[in-house]
Amino acid sequence: MRINEYTSLEQFYNEFDDQHTIKDCEKSIGIEFIYNKTYYRMCKEPIPLTERPVLSNGKTGNYDVLIVHWKNDLFGDFEYELIGWYSDLDDVLENCILQQRK
């Protein structure tokens, strides 16, 4: 987890907004959280727009939601299980199901 680097709520929204692209492809923007003892990660992946998946509705997949399975306590030593790709944050909220809940 990183320390809050934002000086305003608008700055945070702009970082996650579907209309903005990631300027630094080395940077992954996301949220990690635990729900019912399961570790999740939602990311706007640091990959070029041309390499992102096209969803069944024809939109580009900009956000992915994953279950993270840590192999041990070392950072970066994990496997993940893809829940799905989503076009924007509204798509995540409307269609992502975690443990039978939206």
Image (tube, grey):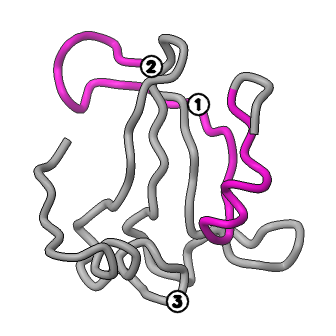
- Taking 2 as reference, is 18 above or below it? below
Question: Cβ–Cβ below 8 Å for labels 2 and 1?
Answer: yes
Q: Secondary structure at mark 3?
A: loop
- Residue for point 88% across, 66% down: 56
In this view of the protein, which residue sits in the foreground, 67 or 35?
A: 35
Element carrying mark 1? strand
Q: Position of residue 96 (x, y in %)?
A: 72, 46
Q: Which residues are magenta?
A: 69-98
Q: Nearer the viewer, mark 1 or mark 3?
A: 3
Q: What distance separates the C-alpha of mark 2 from that of mark 3?
A: 31 Å
Give the spatial CA distance, label 1 vs label 3: 27 Å
Front one among 9 and 25: 9
Q: Compared with residue 89, is residue 70 higher up or lower down, i.e. above or below?
A: above
Q: Earlier in the sequence, mark 2 or mark 3?
A: 3
Residue 91 among those drawn in magenta: yes
Q: Which mark is residue 81?
A: 1
Sequence-earlier tag: 1 or 3: 3
Q: Which residue is mark 3?
A: 19
Q: Which residue is mark 2?
A: 69
Above or below, 49 relative to 72: below
Name which residue lies at 69% across and 47% down.
84
Residue 65 image point, x, y percent:
57, 45
User: Furthest residue to the right?
Assistant: 57
Image quadrant assignment for residue 79: top left
Q: Amino acid at mark 3?
A: Gln
Amino acid on which the number 1 mark rests in the picture: Glu
Q: Nearer the viewer, mark 2 or mark 3?
A: 3
Amino acid type at mark 2: His
Q: Within 10 angstroms of label 3, few (less than 14), some, or many (20 or more) residues? A: few
Q: Are marks 1 and 3 in contact (CB under 8 Å)?
A: no
Res 81 quadrant in image: top right
